[in-house]
């Protein structure tokens, strides 16, 4: 799937923009930061440095070290469920993704929420950085959010209240190496939780977003007749759990064992029908008494939904093609770099199939383009229509 | 949007997501409307064109949408991309606008959006009604709380008021009657509080009461309950106590209150008196209050600024006093209070020149009672004005009834006037009526006032004195030398006569100081043109000294004790014949 990007900037110069990625798996924070920033420290005019860091590190120390090295440039980041480079899926590592040069300008913001009220107001607060940005031809709002703090869709809604339809949203939900306990966010050397951090990026060259997931509907479209926040209650007026178990012909243990259900649902997401696409929702729990499904983000009542199916091949194909989809939307300009955010559930699926490294070969990406990103608990990509929060999806940001 | 066979039931279930369940949820619901049809823009636009809210547009783009709203355009071009608009009517001309780029809405989506708009409209109406109801309930609750507060809290000090105190006292007494607790009560009355109001004004008085209330609030704990009973009276109710604890607390309070307090820039220091009482079995709230009140009253009479514990005799005393008050009222109604007359003698020739009219009570059971047997109670009961009026009336009528007076020989009449009467707005009317009705000549009437009553409310007293003078009535200062003895007042009030107090007269020839004082008063009065009467002359020696010092008139048992009207008339008739031989002496 491609997202239409604004027209290319005729006067932009590739020389006034740079995008670099560095990484390290050195367990010593100081050494890890030094290694990860090695490709960046000599770059002039850094505008935005993004830290993707395993929770195995002391993130407070990492963020302090990075901020101290970068100096005046904006620094944001988050904990991950794995980091990724081209050909190199990482676990327990540190990845730095950075951009700079006169062709870019960046402002950042942060907002704090809490599990009781969610992150809509936090995202709104963080997105206010957009108002301080002196915009060039192409602008985008990049978001990193706590993926374990209420309905993830609220992050998109809160940011969209500020950005409006004219500014695409892109980003992801922080991870914690699948502990599903607590994630962390970084802003200007400060370590946070239950937060949303944002970077408003403006460029004199195009930026475009690609979205792919590789899942296909298994069921007929069903009306979401009951849904509250992250609880999917009924589909076509039937208990959602029963519909789910019956549709997938779930084995007996899945019908009464939460752990078995968790593994089972890992590759059986719910899809929300949009006009010309399907947004994926990650099912990560079941309430056997209430007969409901627990979802990472809201499946809105009144929407049409599918129960999805896929396999390692279809998922692999989506990851391989997403950068190409994004680059195609640059209007013919070559991408200097990519930000790749992929759902951790896909990582698990591909890993089990022994296809994880292959998924990151990214044959369509030119040899000079940098690629970096992380495995997420939720992906954000909104360019048209409503929605914009995805699960079990891979999203790519291409920057010319 | 995919099609689906919706039943009405299913549709209503779906629309439940588009009801606004709290004032802050409207934005969430509107966001879901957009998500339901995969639209980029949603807005609620009021009839007047103002945006209630708008999702998906930046400020400058809202202007374009506002223009489209005004013209009800179905399509708007934003950045060269067509935005298809759908209008779902809301209440009172308001609309919900949904905008989707590139793709128009299907018939099904239009129906759904209209139903969603209706759902939002109904729920916001319900919410508004609920809010109004809650506000009304809130206002009612607030009014109720206010009414309760006003009914139970003293607005000046913020302490529980009389009603609340009595209710608490009743509740505690009920508990005590079950034998679990011993209950005590302190009745606190501020000493000379009226003086604060009179001298510094009521705003200072109120501030002082507030300060006292705040100070007393500090003694509150889980066993004590503090409130303001009325005026300058405060109550402390103490649970689980004994007499020693109660008196200790009373002493602590007295010490705390008897401090110099700066109020309104003035330093005020006033004491308080406290009555202490413990509840007895069967006591009602008013019983315990009365006991403590009696104890307070008792100590205030004897030694203000201290505390006293209730003793049963206080109750007997109080009851006797109450009975006496009732009897005095009855006596005044039935003319049992009559005038006796004590002669006033010319020091120069020894003849009777006038009488002082004195109150006596012909008690039906106890016989003739002197003023000291009932004046104090009459004063406390506020009956002095009636008593003064009664004596004035009786004395004037009796004197004019004397045969010798009818023959043209009029003695002077002195009548005591209390401070209450001197400040009575109807005093002049009353005196004038009495003179007119009795035919007694105003020039022969002297009204005796004490120095203290002159200065109590100078302005009002002065007005009455000026008007008395206009009637032709003279003013005499009684007990001169025992009070303020202000020369300024003598001039200010045009005093016609001074009466030297008997305490000085009794010391004449025995106490040098008294000799000097009496001589000084007589000389000073002579120099001011004021006549002098010496009271309490009981010995020939005193009479001789007074005559030697040039005192004008004498009064005392040596010269004649108070007599009833017939005897006095007889005395005067005899003296009158002597006066005819000596010539009348001005009085």
Image (tube, rainbow, N blue to C red):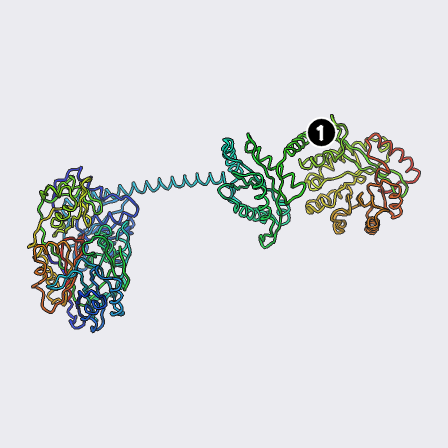
Q: Is residue B331 visible?
A: yes
Q: Is residue A148 left or right of residue B163?
A: left
Which residue is situated farthest in the top direction here? B365
Give the answer, above or below, for where B34 lies relative to B341: below
Q: Residue A191's x, y, as percent? A: 27, 60
Q: Chain of mark 1?
A: B
Closest to the observer, A363 or B16? A363
User: Mark 1 = which residue?
Assistant: B331
Q: Quadrant of the N terminus of chain A?
A: bottom left
Q: Quadrant of residue A192?
A: bottom left
Q: Is residue B543 left or right of residue A79?
A: right
Q: Residue A260's x, y, as percent? A: 14, 46
Q: Residue B319's x, y, as percent? A: 65, 31
Q: Residue B13's x, y, as percent? A: 20, 40
Count of numbered badges drawn on the protein:
1
Give the answer, above or below, for where A279 lies relative to A73: above
Q: Quadrant of the C terminus of chain A?
A: bottom left
Q: Quadrant of residue B342?
A: top right
Give the answer, above or below, for where A112 lies relative to A65: above
Closest to the observer, B308 or A28? A28
Closest to the observer, A9 or A130? A130
For mark 1, give the secondary structure. helix
Closest to the observer, B576 or A26? A26
Within 10 Å of the Cα at label 1, are there few (<14), some (14-19), or many (20+) other Cα atoms? Answer: some
Q: Is residue A143 visible?
A: no
């Amino acid at each position: 799937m491609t997202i239409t990007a604004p027209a290319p900037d005729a006067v932009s110069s590739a020389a006034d923009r740079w995008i670099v990625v560095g990484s390290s798996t050195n367990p010593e924070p100081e050494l890890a930061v030094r290694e990860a920033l090695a490709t960046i420290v000599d770059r002039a005019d850094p505008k935005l440095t993004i830290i993707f860091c395993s929770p195995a590190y002391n993130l407070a120390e990492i963020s302090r070290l990075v901020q101290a090295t970068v100096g005046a440039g904006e620094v944001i980041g988050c904990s991950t469920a794995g980091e990724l480079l081209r050909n190199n899926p990482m676990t327990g590592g540190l990845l730095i993704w950075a951009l700079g040069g006169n062709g870019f300008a960046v402002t950042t913001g942060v907002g704090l929420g809490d599990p009781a009220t969610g992150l809509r107001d936090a995202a709104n607060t963080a997105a206010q950085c957009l108002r301080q940005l002196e915009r060039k031809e192409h602008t985008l709002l990049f978001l990193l959010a706590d993926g374990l703090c209420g309905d993830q869709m609220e992050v998109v809604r809160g940011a969209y209240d500020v950005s409006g339809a004219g500014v695409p949203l892109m980003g992801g939900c922080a991870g914690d190496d699948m502990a599903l306990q607590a994630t962390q966010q970084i802003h200007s050397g400060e370590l946070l939780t239950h937060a949303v951090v944002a970077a408003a990026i403006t460029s004199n060259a195009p930026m475009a977003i690609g979205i792919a997931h590789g899942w296909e509907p298994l069921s007929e479209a069903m009306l979401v007749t009951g849904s509250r926040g992250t609880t999917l209650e009924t589909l076509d007026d039937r208990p959602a759990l029963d519909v789910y178990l019956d549709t997938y012909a779930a084995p007996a243990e899945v019908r009464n064992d939460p752990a078995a259900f968790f593994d089972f649902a890992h590759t059986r997401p719910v899809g929300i029908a949009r006009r010309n696409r399907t947004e994926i929702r990650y099912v990560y729990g079941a309430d056997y008494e209430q007969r409901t499904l627990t979802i990472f983000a809201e499946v809105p009542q009144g929407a049409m939904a599918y129960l999805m199916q896929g396999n390692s091949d279809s998922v692999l194909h989506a990851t391989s093609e997403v950068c190409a989809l994004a680059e195609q939307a640059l209007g013919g300009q070559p991408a200097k770099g990519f930000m790749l955010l992929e759902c951790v559930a896909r990582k698990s699926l591909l890993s089990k199939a022994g296809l994880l490294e292959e998924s990151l070969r990214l044959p369509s990406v030119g040899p000079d383009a940098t690629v970096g990103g992380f495995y997420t608990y939720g992906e954000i990509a909104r360019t048209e229509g409503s929605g914009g929060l995805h699960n079990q999806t891979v999203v790519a940001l291409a920057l010319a | 949007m995919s099609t689906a066979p919706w039943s009405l039931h299913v549709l209503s279930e779906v629309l439940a997501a588009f009801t606004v369940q709290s004032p802050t949820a409207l934005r969430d619901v509107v966001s879901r409307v957009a998500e339901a049809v995969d639209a980029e823009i949603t807005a609620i636009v009021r009839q007047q064109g103002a945006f209630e809210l708008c999702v998906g547009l930046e400020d400058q783009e809202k202007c374009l949408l506002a223009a489209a709203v005004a013209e009800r355009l179905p399509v708007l071009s934003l950045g060269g991309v067509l935005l298809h608009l759908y209008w779902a009517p809301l209440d009172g001309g308001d609309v919900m606008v949904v905008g989707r780029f590139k793709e128009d809405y299907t018939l099904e989506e239009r129906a759904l959006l209209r139903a969603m708009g209706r759902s939002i409209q109904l729920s916001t109406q319900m919410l508004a009604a609920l809010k109004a109801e809650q506000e009304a309930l809130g206002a009612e609750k607030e009014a109720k709380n206010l009414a309760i507060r006003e009914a139970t809290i003293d607005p000046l000090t913020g302490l529980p008021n009389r009603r609340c105190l009595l209710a608490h006292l009743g509740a505690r007494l009920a508990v005590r009657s079950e034998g679990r607790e011993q209950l005590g009560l302190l009745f606190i009355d501020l000493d000379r509080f009226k003086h604060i109001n009179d001298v510094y004004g009521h705003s200072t008085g109120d501030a002082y009461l507030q300060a006292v209330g705040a100070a007393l609030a500090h003694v509150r704990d889980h066993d004590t309950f503090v409130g303001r009973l009325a005026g300058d009276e405060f109550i402390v109710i103490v649970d689980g106590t004994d007499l020693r604890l109660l008196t200790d607390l009373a002493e602590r309070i007295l010490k705390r209150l008897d401090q110099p307090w700066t109020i309104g820039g003035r330093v005020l220091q006033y004491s308080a008196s406290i009555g202490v009482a413990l509840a007895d079995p069967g006591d009602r709230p008013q019983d315990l209050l009365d006991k403590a009140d009696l104890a307070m009253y008792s100590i205030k009479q004897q030694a203000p600024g201290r505390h006293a514990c209730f003793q049963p005799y206080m109750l007997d005393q109080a009851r006797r006093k109450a009975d006496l008050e009732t009897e005095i009222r009855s006596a005044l109604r039935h003319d049992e209070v009559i005038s006796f007359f004590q002669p006033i003698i010319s020091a120069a020739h020894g003849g009777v020149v006038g009488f002082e009219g004195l109150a006596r009570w012909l008690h039906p059971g106890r016989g003739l009672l002197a003023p000291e047997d009932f004046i104090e109670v009459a004063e406390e009961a506020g009956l002095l004005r009636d008593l003064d009026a009664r004596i004035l009336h009786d004395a004037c009528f009796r004197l004019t009834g004397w045969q010798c007076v009818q023959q043209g020989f009029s003695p002077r009449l002195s009548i005591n006037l209390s401070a209450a009467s001197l400040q009575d707005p109807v005093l002049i009317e009353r005196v004038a009526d009495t003179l007119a009705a009795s035919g007694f000549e105003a020039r022969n009437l002297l009204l005796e006032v004490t120095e203290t009553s002159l200065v109590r409310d100078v302005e009002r007293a002065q007005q009455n004195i000026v008007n008395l003078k206009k009637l032709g009535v003279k003013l005499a200062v009684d007990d001169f030398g025992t009070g303020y003895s202000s020369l300024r007042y003598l001039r200010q009030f045009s005093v016609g006569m001074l009466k030297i107090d008997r305490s000085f007269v009794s010391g004449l020839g025995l106490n040098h100081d008294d000799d000097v004082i009496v001589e000084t008063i007589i000389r000073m009065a002579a120099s001011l043109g004021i006549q002098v009467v010496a009271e309490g002359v009981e010995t020939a020696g005193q009479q001789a000294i007074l005559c030697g010092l040039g005192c004008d008139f004498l009064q005392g048992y040596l010269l004649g004790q108070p007599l009833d009207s017939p005897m006095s008339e007889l005395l005067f008739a005899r003296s009158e014949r002597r006066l005819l031989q000596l010539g009348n002496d001005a009085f």
